Structure formats: structure tokens, C-alpha cells
Image (tube, rainbow, N blue to C red):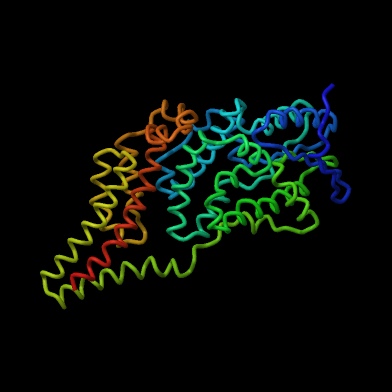
Amino acid sequence: MDTINNHNIERMAHGDKEIVILGTAHVSRESARQVDLLIENEMPDTVCVELCPSRYQSIRQKESWLDTDIVKVVREKKAFLLLASLLLTSFQKKIAKKLNITAGQEMIQAIDSADKIGAHIELVDRDIRVTLSRIWRAMGLWDKVKLMFQLLLSLGDVDDISEEDIERMKQEDILESLLAEVGKSLPVLKSILIEERDRYISQKIRNAPGQKILAIVGAGHVPGIRKHWNTDISLEQLETIPPGRKYMGTLKWLLPGLIVALFVYGFFQGGSKAGSDMLVWWIAANGILAGLGALFALAHPYTILSSVLSAPLTSLNPMIAAGWVSGLVEAFSRKPKVKDLESLHEDILSIKGFWKNNVTRILLVVVFTNMGSMLGTMVAIPLMLKVL
């Protein structure tokens, strides 16, 4: 006879609402079975699932990737967010494949079981794009570079994962598992990835409609939900992407201005020879390193050329980035086909696949060209000063 593990169940109340919270393992087939049994036994009015709208859509609409407008993604400066989201999805899918289960199987089961009894489905997790945006805004340039490479390297690490690691992941949030190493040096990650989402999920469950509510969440979130259960939480505040740091807004205009002033000073103080040498160093450092970034992403030759030519100019214009130029050139040079979108869910399971698929390669081009251009600026300035 099938039984339910009551150790994973929390029974709580909010006003006249009866709320049952089931802590699940994101990489456990047993969790999916427990979800089905509990929904059948409790017959709730509402089933809350730890999904955001974009992740729910990916489950409900398997072909949603076919509607992706990659050019729009680049133009709206969302390349990093989409790439990071795909890397997180890849990590979870590789773990699931290693265990021979479906990624997020317990959430899929919750949706199916809720449909079967006619219960309302409530999405209670914060949108992954908001979470990633808040992380991005909270980090400095070097931390961003570390984060991107950690995400990429994590794909290879999955193959060497141990049974002990898998058991740990059954009790942790999948995002926390992936970014554990980065989190040691970046405590802000834990605050945004876990603690903020604990508060968000807690409030969303309490706001859910119905008299009897069953919530399916990762076991790692249950202690945080319990901690914040009686706290009034502003969802709007947690959904807001904070503005960039004020000094960064000033710096992005001040730095190009100082570089132009440096050129002018070089020509007047050191003559045309010194000014020309400074100009050569600026163009070479920016162009070559941006081009190398595009080359690392295996960009089209036209894209690499556009990176080399645009970087020295875009580095002086705070409104344009070299990666956006090269990303658009790559998108038009190797326009993604339907087959790229259809195979995306398989290609993101390997590092090689990220570089092979035309969609993810465009995102890599944007990110690595921008990194190369920023590094080029940092290299060029001391070289220019040396000329003086």
C-alpha cells in the first residue's frame, strides 16, 4: 500500500485557510509519487507549485522556444539573462538525465494531478529573469566574469558528480547547488537566490485562493518559509529590479570622457607621434581583445571583423556595447533556423552544444565580445599612459 512520508509535510494556517506544504527533492522520482498521493488524499482547492511563469510555460508549451526572437533578445540587452537561464536549465537536465528522471518531475506531477481533480494551479516562485537581474545588478564586473565561467564550467562538473553530491542536492535548491562555489566568495548570491525567494514563496502561498491549499516546494525552502510565515512581505519590492549603482552611471560617462581627454592631452603635450601611438594602442587593445572574445565564441568571420572594428568606438559610447553589434552581425550572418530552436533542449546538455547551436552561439558572442572589449579598455589605458 502506498504511503506518504509525513516528515516532509508541514501543516500551517493563515486566517481561515488550511495550508499543507510538501517539501520535495527536485531530483527524486519518489518525490513525484509523494506529490500524486498527497494531492489525491487532500483534494485541495489550490495547488501551489515552485515555478515561475516562464518555467511553467516551458513545461506546458514544449515548443515555446520556436517563438524566440534572438535579434530582439540582443537589442533589449537580455543576452546574458537568456544564456544564464539556459545554463541553469542545462545543469538541472543533466542531473535528471544522470538519475534517469525528468527534470522537475515532481512539479510536472503536481500540475497533472491538480488538473485531474480540477484544482486551481498557483505559480509561487519569482520569475527566474528577475532573480538573475537582481544578481547581475548586485555584482561588480569581476564577479560577473567569475559567475559566467562558473556556470559554463558546471556543465562539465556534472559528469563527475558523486552519490554524496546527489544526496545533498535532494535537500538543496537547484540554483544554490549550481552556484555553491561562487557563493563562498559572493554571499549576495545566497541572499538573492535563496533568502529572497523563501520570503517571496511564503507570501505567494498565503495569498493563494481557496480554503484548502497544498504547496509543492523544494525541501530546501521549507525552513525559510516557516521562518517568514508570520511576516508581512512586499512582493512588489522583491519583484523590482533595482537601478544600477549611481556611481556606475556616472562612471560610464566619465570614463569615456577621460579617455578622450587623454587623447587630446597626448596630441597637445606629446605631439602627433605620441597622440598617434596612443590611438594605435587604444584601437589595438580594444579591437584585438574584443575580436578574441568573438573568436572564443566561434563567431562568423564577419562577426569577428565587426567586433574588431566596433570595439574601439563602442568603448567610447556608453549607449552601445561591442557585444550588441557583434551579436546582431552574428544573428544575420548565421540566422538561427527552426532546427536550431527545435534542438535547443538537447544541445544545451553539453558545452559543445552551446557552441554548436546558432541560438546559444549568438548569446556567447554577445557575452564574450563584451568581456573582451571591457578587458581591452583596462589594458589600453596603462599602455596609453606609458606613451606619455
242 vs 35: above or below: below
Q: What's the residue at 63%, 40% (across, down)?
A: 169
The quadrant in which the C terminus is found is bottom left
The quadrant in which the N terminus is found is top right
- Viewer-closest of 7 and 52: 7
| Numbered label tally | 0
Q: Position of residue 118 (x, y in %)?
A: 78, 29
- Viewer-closest of 199 and 220: 220
Q: Quadrant of residue 104?
A: top right
Q: Quadrant of residue 247?
A: bottom left
4 vs 260: above or below: above
100 vs 12: above or below: above
- Viewer-closest of 293 and 110: 293
Horizontal side, residue 312 vs residue 67: left or right: left
Q: What's the residue at 43%, 50% (across, down)?
A: 77
Q: Position of residue 66 (x, y in %)?
A: 48, 30
Horizontal side, residue 276 vs residue 42: left or right: left
Q: Which residue appears farthest toward the right when viewing the image? A: 16
Q: Position of residue 88 (x, y in %)?
A: 53, 41
Q: Which residue appears farthest toward the top when viewing the image? A: 1
Q: Position of residue 142 (x, y in %)?
A: 43, 58
Q: What's the residue at 26%, 56% (across, down)?
A: 286
Q: Which residue appears farthest toward the bottom when viewing the image? A: 269
Horizontal side, residue 174 vs residue 382: left or right: right
129 vs 28: above or below: below
Q: What's the residue at 76%, 59% (across, down)?
A: 232
